[in-house]
Amino acid sequence: MRIAINGGLLIDPKAGTEKKQNVYINNGVVEAIGKSPAWGNKKATNIDASGLIVSPGFVDLRARMREPGHEHKATLASETRAAAIAGITSLCMPPDCIPAIDTPAIAQMIKHRANGLGGTQVYPIAALTHGLHGSVLTDMKALIDAGCVGVSNALTPLDNSLVMRRALQYATTFDILTLIYPQNASLRGNGVAHEGRVSTRLGLPASPVAAEIVGLARDLALVETTGARAHFCGISSARAVEMIQEARARGLSVTADVAIAHLHLTEDSLLSFDTNCHVEPPFRSEQDRQALISAVADGTITAICTDHQPHEPEAKLTPFSESEPGTSSLEVLLPLALTTGKQTQMPLASTIALLTYGPAQILNIDVGEISVGHRADICIFDLDEQWILNKDTINSAGKNSPFLGDTLTGKVKQVICGGKLKIN
Amino acid sequence: MSSSGLRDSHVQLNEDGSLRHFLTIDGLSQSLLTEIMENAERFIDFGQRKIKKAPLLRGYTIVNLFFEPSTRTRTTFEIAAKRLSADVINLNAQRSSTSKGETLLDTARNLQAMHADMLIVRDSHAGAAHLIATHLNDQLQVVNAGDGRHAHPTQAMLDMFTIRQYKPDFSKLAVAIVGDVLHSRVARSQIQALGILGVPDIRVIGPNTLIPTDVESLGVTAHTSMETGLDNVDVVIMLRLQRERMIGQLIASEQEYFKTWGLTQERFASTNKNAIVMHPGPINRGLEISSSMADSPNSLILPQVTNGIAIRMSVLSMVMSGVEGVKE
């Protein structure tokens, strides 16, 4: 299949391109940029991208597919399709499915299932410990060989610092990236809301900033002493941003991401007991949110992810603290990232980098760019089109978004995933 | 995405501003709180009548749905409803988030299918009554009898009603709330009610482990010392300490707690003349309050219980009066 994307503004942060250029795709691969190949526009699907942005397909560092184990919430089929339509052409799946991704067989099964569906490419993250129980290290090398792109204990922090240290040391043996959700479990306790004004007013069990920064401080110390390559997932507080900054300034091999909803919501969103605002880590203060936005703008945080966690309706139809945490966020990634970009007056290419080359570089995988000879993963979007997020415009099986009913600006118009059109 | 923060009060009010449900004090108007108290006045001598019944809620079915143990609150709600001639059913239900039992909403829907008219709900999770009211808004009236650490609005109103009997001018009062503010839904609702009624000086007193973060945002000042905290106050509200789960964690020992924050006659001397002492019960003698203080003439612990019935009659009748067919 040949595709010609004509008349769009091509922005590829990796190559530094920002220019009106046509892109020509043949057999799933980018064949030419700018200069037309011999076949020209003939016998090709022509896409008129005039007035639109042509960018690399997005790379999402964290999206739950719910398969295997929670197919009543969502499936690989439903979520890889929804992700592709949202412009996400590569995504990482955390290991906390059931069973956890702790053997090569499970990793291969997921990759095989996902890639047979023809949607977004799925990159599994391997469990750091068996069953995520925090005691026995997994066969990391074999898991990476089976297609995993890093190791992580997902949302279950390792209580035992010795196990954490050995896990990092072992990972460095093979230069494997460790993805860490920084959290001290006992300080978090049963907290479901940021400890502050709102948790005090509503009487919700609180998770203090200390839970995040105590966990982060320990793990940074272990990263420093082991020389490990570490990525910190879903930073939520201003102090954590400073600590990442300091660590990077001292030359540690440390990166960080933020979930898109944390750039837009604070503890105030809980005031109506909206269970769609129950997330882990919790939405924090306005000051924390501003620090996260600055960190995205100044390069401390180099990736924005969806932290997509689709749920069935019943998971959220409970009192707040009993509801399951997480938002369905595939569809909001682009429009909300563009909004943050505009607020901070970031160049458009920098915003796109946070969704493409930034996360790809963290993982050290060969996606998030548009270059000749590369797999054709491309997102074509309208910067200014407004649309309303509702249960019909959410393609994910999970409709649990705190942004339901909101008018969003920026709409994906066409997606090419491995050379195939994803929007009819 | 709602940032109003007043959605609770929107859910609990009819369009004309009258009570539809009673979920929280947060966001209610001074005139509504005053109306609840004034309406309660007419029920206050009910208990001394020979025939302790009014026909206001005759024919209505009220369900006490309690997922947490309670004696006093459940009983006073039951008495209040029966004195208003409603049929009352008590359900002491078990619920666990880990076991795959019936959900809270399903339980409520079942009761609604049995044509219950009102649910009086107690649950250990903040927002439980709010959840039922939001999802069964048109079919059922909901009264919150305590949800987690969030709110206990009828308890707060009976406390305001009791204060008013002795100190009618809220705008001149200093009130201290002592003890476990962190875990107390009673304290949260009291603080909101006192603020709405115009009390200019509201204080909380306790060790830093029991005072919630950013407590000042509720409109109070925080004190760690009883001596400064009780200085010149008119009302002292003692909170119950849950011994079992606190000792060695949130407080060091019972001895140190009583020595530092227990209410004794000696400490009480620094309050204003004719100051009153209240406690939502059940009390721990010798832990948060000395026996002599609990039994002193300044203590209103038992009148609080009596007033609880009148306030609950007031709230139940006001909530049901918005429903078609209930006429006063």
Image (tube, rainbow, N blue to C red):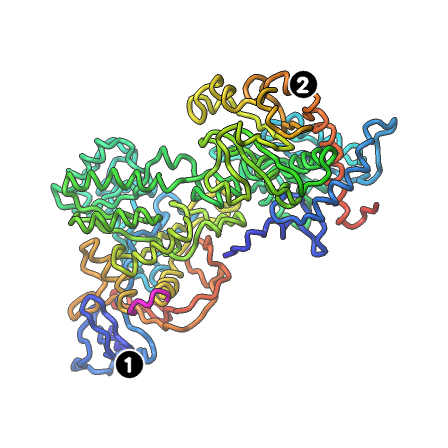
- Which residue is at 25% across, 52% downward? A123
Q: Chain of mark 2?
A: B
Q: Is residue B89 left or right of residue A50?
A: right
Q: Is residue B208 above or below residue B319?
A: above
Q: A156 or B6, which is in the foreground?
A: B6
Q: Chain of mark 1?
A: A
Quadrant occupied by the N terminus of chain A: bottom left
* Circle 2: residue type: Asp
* Percent x, y of residue B61: 74, 38
- Which residue is at 30% across, 69% downward? A348
Circle 2: element type: loop
* Percent x, y of residue A135: 25, 31
A345 drawn magenta: yes
For residue A7, the mark is: 1
Q: Is residue B278 above or below residue A279?
A: above
- Which residue is at 47% across, 63% downward? A389
Q: Is residue B257 left or right of residue A352?
A: right
Q: B152 or B160, which is in the foreground?
A: B160
Label 1 vs label 2, nearer the camera: 2
Quadrant occupied by the C terminus of chain A: bottom left
Q: Is residue A286 visible?
A: yes
Segment tinted magenta in the rendering: A343-348
User: 10 Å neighbourhood of mark 1: few (<14), some, or many (≥20)?
Assistant: some
Q: Is residue B24 visible?
A: no
Q: Which residue is mark 2?
A: B295
SS assignment for the magenta stretch, majority: loop
* Circle 1: residue type: Gly
Mark 1 and mark 2 residues within 8 Å of each other at the beta carbon: no
Q: CA distance from mark 1 to mark 2?
A: 86 Å
* Percent x, y of residue A328: 41, 54
Q: A196 or B205, which is in the foreground?
A: B205
Q: Which residue lies most toward the left here? A: A173
